[in-house]
Amino acid sequence: MANLSVSLAGISLQNPTILASGIMGVSASSLKFVEEHGAGAVTMKSIGPTDRTGHKNPTVYSWGEGITNAVGLSNPGAEEGAAHLEEMKKILHIPVIASCFADTVDNIAKVAEKLLEKEPLALELNLSCPNTEDDFGCMFAMDPRVTERAVTLVKKTSGKTKIFVKLSPDASNIVTVAKAAEAAGADGITAINTLSGLIIDIHTKRPILKNTFGGLSGPAIRPVGVRAVYNLYEAVKIPIIGTGGINTGEDAIEYIMAGATAVGIGSGVYYRGIDVFGKVTEEMENFMDQNGYKSLEEMRGIAHKC
């Protein structure tokens, strides 16, 4: 049977599926539930400097080809977030990836420092939430210089914790931003975050989401994510977590063949239920067995050789 284990920047995963940030809240019990349904690792919801309620409803809308959301980074703040992280580390047996955001580079370094006190195996810097422009201004991940400064500051206190940087497909050149992150010491790239979008109800003549704009996810954005991973694989040496529209084992393998080391699953929970992780890994195993692949390494980046 095919071997799905993977080393992600030195972190061992039994399989390459990772719960994407923001899908199951911040409680340890909810992430334990994800572990019990087959995920190889989980990413906690992004934590900011202080508690934040996020945007008003409606915040999520399924539009047929995907999902749009503008939850607005609701979270309990750095102090309580760190306490949740400590509890997650106690009860989960798979790797927990912490995640953080902030309004300024200095503040994201402070939030990171608070979470790093709990010594997670990895910390994701969410530099690319597309639906908080009114609150925070331009996403950090739109500018390679800002990205490099954020990573540099966080790396000063990260110790053994691996730092992953979550990038935006809305950046004019995602490769340039990724290279800046790598130069500053990032240990991995998460690509992609959602795309900024707008859906209008033609009967009410108004945007459907209260925030007007939202982040697009789901099957419609998978080709965008795969392209980003394909381009990044040729540009950086650090591992890539391919994220965006992964619902099936075949979707995950597409990302692996583009160059991803692991895959993030978010909207797949909505489409196939919490056991999507077990379903995806079983489908990956079946594909690999049927096609003679014994490990993910044999498939990683193979699309570049054609």
Image (tube, helix red, strand yellow):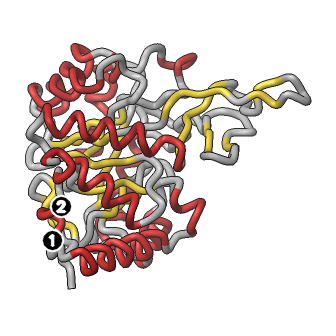
Checking the image for residue 77, the label placed there is none
> Please, is residue 216 above or below residue 300 in the view?
above
Q: In percent of the image, x 15 and y 26: which residue is there? A: 179
118 and 64: which is toward the camera:
64
Instruction: Give the CA distance from mark 1 to mark 2.
Output: 7 Å
Amino acid marked by disc 2 = Met
Q: Disc 1 marks which amino acid?
A: Ser
* Residues at marks 1 and 2 touching, judged by CB atoms closer than 8 Å: yes
Number of residues whose C-alpha sits closer than 10 Å to that of mark 2, classed few (under 14), some (14–19) or many (20 or more): some
Q: Residue 94: x, y in percent?
A: 28, 70
Q: Nearer the viewer, residue 102 or 210?
A: 210
The image quarter containing residue 110 is: top left
Residue at left 53%, top 25%?
Answer: 132
Position of residue 224 in the picture relative to residue 274 (left or right): left
Q: Residue at x 31, y 48 (%)?
A: 242
Q: Residue furthest front?
A: 306
Q: Name the residue that disc number 1 marks.
A: 295
Relative side of 100 to 131, left or right = left
Please identify the quarter of the rendering in which residue 2 is found.
bottom left
| Mark number displayed over residue 299 | 2
Quadrant showing the N terminus = bottom left
